Image (cartoon, grey):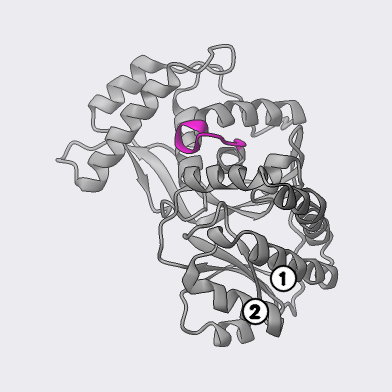
Amino acid sequence: MKGPLFYAKILLFGEYGIIKNSKGLSIPYNSYNGCLNTSNDVLNAYQKKSNRRLREFANFLKDIDKRIVEFDHKRIALDLSKNMYFDSSIPQGYGIGSSGALVASIYDCYAFNKIEVLKNLSEKKLQCLKKIFSHMESFFHGKSSGLDPLNSYLSLPIFINSNNYVESTGIPSKNKNAKGAVFLLDTGIMTNTKFMVKLFFEKMKKKSFSQMFENQFISKTDSCVEHFLKGNIKALFINLKELSLLVFNNFEPMIPDNYKTIWKHGIHTNIFYFKLCGSGGGGYILGFTKNWSQAKKELSDYKLQLVCQL
């Protein structure tokens, strides 16, 4: 057995905001992928750990309301007995959807009455899938929007207009003379999404933070999404700078200590702007620059990966 590949994702905009109904934009990241696999050989340490985690996940799936989604539990159990594991290159704890790809794989392989998306991709189908994936992925994060698995399952950019409306979208094609870029900076630190989300909700209990979040953070996030989709690079970077500063000033626990100085340097020099990639706390940091060559020189001491050009 070897299942189809499901890719990592990058939430360009909407981290934490989509919990409170902000706009969001998520894209597939094909540099990393994963698939379900079985082995006749003795499993290595990673494969054993994955198999144990899949067994726990399989038990969790039994408790999901069958009116939402129902699985072929007998076949899951049979494949688990054949040493099934998730064969993945997606870094775990890095904010690019390792659990989302796994959830999409399990749904694709074992769900009864699976929703097909190759044709007639309606808004109703997307909402139904989002609900299913939200229940499934809550096993990993405690609370999930369902967007990571949805992005991995569709392998298409997704525009989140609100909690109740998502749609597949296109990304503006880059100008042939484009110098800008979206990139990832590897902190080398694994993060715990469940802990970070819990921390966020604790911060939301403070009036000053919740007011900033609802009145400023969401507004800037929405503007970034709109300008990105319209290809308005100048307006995008004006809002990105303000968004990066808001994150720096208000999400300090989500920014690893060793990266606060360089984060602030980017804002002051306007060479690049950073934002959280997923929940933050480690993993990747998401960067935006109008001059990729200059940003690479400025960040030569760091491990960078190009996502797309602007």
> From mark 2 to mark 1, how far is it between C-alphas?
18 Å
Q: Residue at x 26, y 41 (%)?
A: 49
Residue 108 visible within the image? no
Indicate the position of residue 44 as horizontal and vertical percent values.
Answer: 19, 46
Residue at 46 percent across and 42 percent down: it is 99
The residue where tag 2 is placed is 266
Rendered location of residue 242, percent (x, y) = 77, 68
Mark 2 closeness class: few <14, some 14–19, many ≥20 residues within 10 Å? many
The three-letter code of the residue at mark 1 reads Leu
Residue 52 quadrant: top left
Nearer to the camera, 4 or 73: 73
Q: Are marks 2 and 1 in contact (CB under 8 Å)?
A: no
Where residue 63 sits: x, y (%)? 45, 16
Q: In this picture, which residue range is highlighted in magenta?
A: 138-146
State the residue position of label 1.
Answer: 310
Return the residue nearer the eye: 6 or 271. 271
Spot the residue most to the left: 42
Disc 1, SS? loop
Q: Mark 2 or mark 1, which is nearer to you? A: 2
Q: Residue at x 56, y 78 (%)?
A: 261
